[in-house]
Image (tube, rainbow, N blue to C red):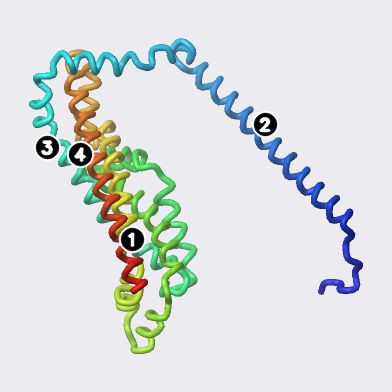
Amino acid sequence: MADMTAAPLSTEQIRDQYSEMVHRKRLYGGLLLVLFVALMVAGFKTADGRNAGSFGEGITHVFDYPAEVLAEASEKLSEMPAHLVHFFPALIETLNIAAAATLVGVVFGTLLSLLATHGMAPSPALIPLFRRISDICRAIPEIVIALVLIFLLGGGPVPAMIAIAIHTAGALGKLFSEVNENASLKPVEGLESVGSSWGQRMWLGVIPQVGPNYVSYALLRFEINIRASAILGFVGAGGIGYELKNAMSWGQGRYDEAAAIFLLLFITIVAVDQLSGLLRDRLIHGAKSGANT
C-alpha cells in the first residue's frame, strides 16, 4: 500500500527526474541508432563482398535492362496486341489462383479469428493455441510454402493456391480478430440465452456486425494475392509469372513478350486496386451510414 504520509516532491525534484528520464531516453535512442547503423553497414559490406561485382559499379547499369526491354518492345510494337492476347489466358490463371486462395483464406481466417477472440471462442483455454496457429501461417513466406508443395505435388497452380491461402488465412485471422474485439457481445448473449449453437451465435450475432470490415480486408488481400501469385510463377507455380520467367530467361529476342506481360500485370493490378478501393469505400461508408440511421 502506498505511503500517503510521504512528503510531496518539490518543483526542482520533479524537474530533475524529468530531465533524467529525457536524458536516459535519448541515450537509449542514440545507442539503438548506432547499433542500427552498424548493422546496416556490416550487412551492406557483406552483401557487396559476396556479390559478383561491386555495388558502385553495378548501380550505374541499373537501367540497362529496362532500356533493352523497352527498346526491343518499341521495335516490335506491331506484335504487342498479339502478345497481349496470347498471354491473357495465363493472366486469367493468375487471377483464378489469387481468387481461390483469397476465398479459402477468408474462410479459414474467419474461423481462426472467431476461435481466438475472447467472448466468442467456444473454448477460452484454446485461444492462445489458435493465435499461435495464425502467427505461424502468416510468418512463413508464401514462396517457402510453395517450394515445399511443389516438391511434394509438382509444379502448377495448385501449390501456389495452397501456399497463398495458408498465408492469407494467417494474415486475415489476425486482422479479423482485431475487428471482432470491437463487436458487441449482446447479440451473442441473447442468442445463447435461447439455446443457439456456437455456429448460430457467430453467424447471426457476430458476422452481421463485422461483415463489411471482413469484406474490405478480403478485397485488400485479393490485391496482394494477385502480386503474390505472379511472383510464385517464377518458382514453377504456373500463371503469368511462369510466362514472364520464360520470357526473361530467353533474353534478347523475347523482351517484347516480357514487356507485354509487364503491361498486362500493370493494367490488371491498377484496375483491381481501383475497383476494390471503390468497393471498400462503399462498404465502409455504407455500413457507417446505416449504423448512424
Estimate the x, y position of residue 160 in percent, counting from the top left: 26, 42
Q: Earlier in the sequence, mark 2 or mark 4?
A: 2
Numbered mark located on residue 34 in the image: 2
Residues at circles 2 and 4 in contact by the CB criterion of under 8 Å: no
| Residue 75, quarter of picture | top left
Q: Quote the CA–CA distance across marks 4 and 3.
A: 14 Å
Location of residue 177 (image quadrant): bottom left
User: Which picture quadrant has residue 120?
Assistant: bottom left
Query: As rendered, which of 283 and 43 lies closer to the eye?
Result: 283
Residue at x 34% of width, y 63% of height: 110
Determine crowd level at label 4: few under 14, some 14-19, many 20+ residues with C-alpha closer than 10 A.
some
Foreground label between 2 and 1: 1
Q: Which residue is mark 4?
A: 156
Residue that sits furthest to the top in the current view? 57
Q: Which numbered disc, 4 or 1, marks the residue that appears first in the sequence?
A: 4
Residue 106 visible in the displayed image: no
Mark 1 or 3, nearer chain start = 3
Question: Label 2 vs label 4: CA separation?
Answer: 47 Å
Quick check: marks 2 and 1 in contact, CB under 8 Å? no
The amino acid on which the numbered mark 4 sits, given as a three-letter code, is: Gly
Q: Which residue is mark 3?
A: 89
Q: Secondary structure at mark 4?
A: loop
- Please say if the residues under marks 4 and 3 sit with CB atoms less than 8 Å apart: no
Q: Position of residue 3 (x, y in %)?
A: 86, 72
Numbered disc in front, either 2 or 4: 2
In the picture shown, does residue 279 fall above or below 26?
below
Identify residue for label 1.
284
* Amino acid at the residue labelled 3: Pro
Q: Secondary structure at mark 3?
A: helix
